[in-house]
Image (tube, rainbow, N blue to C red):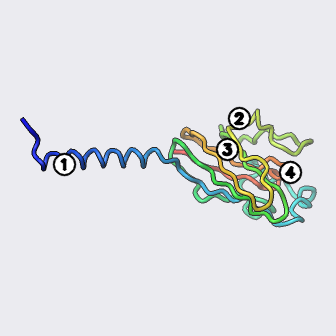
Amino acid sequence: MGMTRRSWVALAATLAMGLVGGQAQARPAVVKVSLWDRGAMSMAMLERGPMMGMEAGHMPNGPMGISVSTATVPAGDVTFNVTNDSTVMEHEMVVSPVKDERTPLPYNKAAQKVDEDAAGHLGEVAELAQGQKGSLTLSMKPGRYVLYCNIAGHYALGMWTLLTVK
């Protein structure tokens, strides 16, 4: 028994749809990340203000911050396209899981940095000079994650944000 031309066309269309769908699912989610500060005087606030790390709640009016194009992505490969939008200082982006949002990240006050190993560091786009870009792709499971800058004092000045992976 042979297949008719109509059967071949239907089979080819079905296979093509499966291939296209498979390719679309294989693409990583993309998160555009902006690392920013309010200029050279941002660091002066470290001595004057309260700590704006995760335990303080989100502080959108801090002197530094991280903005993302989306706060929720599907589980799987996630690509972070990171831009240091500062005109005066270096920044970086570190990714760590959040076990409990009420529990602060392990912070070394003397070094003014998060203990990345204790926080469960998953990857980073290391020190980016002003205007520089970098990217990072991670395979992510459902959960909450924190993106933060771990250059001395920057996390405490509000340079962090949360990401949900569903």
In three-dimensional space, the C-alpha distance between marks 1 and 4, rounded to whole angstroms, equals: 61 Å
What residue lies at 84% left-to-right and 66% top-to-bottom?
39
Residue 26 placed where, x, y %? 46, 44
Which of disc 2 and disc 3 is earlier in sequence? 3
Q: Residues within 10 Å of mark 1 (few under 14, many from 20)?
A: few
Where's residue 99, x and y in %? Answer: 65, 37
Q: What type is the residue that disc 1 sits on?
A: Ala
Task: Please report whichever mark, 4 or 3, sits nearer to the chain's N-terminal start.
Answer: 3
Determine which quarter of the picture holds residue 119.
top right
Report the mark closest to the observer, 3 or 1: 1
Which badge, 3 or 1, is on the more N-terminal residue?
A: 1
Q: Amino acid at mark 3?
A: Glu
Q: In which quadrant is the N terminus drawn?
A: top left
Residue at the spot of label 4: 153
Residue placed at 30% from the left, 49% from the top?
17
* SS class, disc 3: loop
Distance from disc 2 to disc 4, alpha carbons, whole Å, reads 19 Å
What residue type is disc 4 on? Answer: Gly
Q: Is 78 left or right of 43, judged from the image as shown?
A: left
- The disc, 1 or 2, on the residue closer to the chain's N-terminal end is 1
**Label 3 Cα crowd, 10 Å radius (few <14 / some 14-19 / many 20+):** some
Neighbours of disc 2 within 10 Å: few (<14), some (14-19), many (20+) = some
Secondary structure of the residue carrying numbered label 1: helix
Q: Are marks 3 and 2 in contact (CB under 8 Å)?
A: no
Q: CA distance from mark 3 to mark 1?
A: 51 Å
Question: Closer to us: mark 1 or mark 4?
Answer: 1
Q: Residue 101 shows which numbered tag?
A: 3
Taking the image as shown, residue 69 lies to the left or right of residue 21, namely: right
Callout 4–callout 3 Cβ contact below 8 Å: no
Residue closer to the observer: 16 or 151 = 16
**In the structure shown, which secondary structural element does the residue marked by tag 4 occupy?**
loop
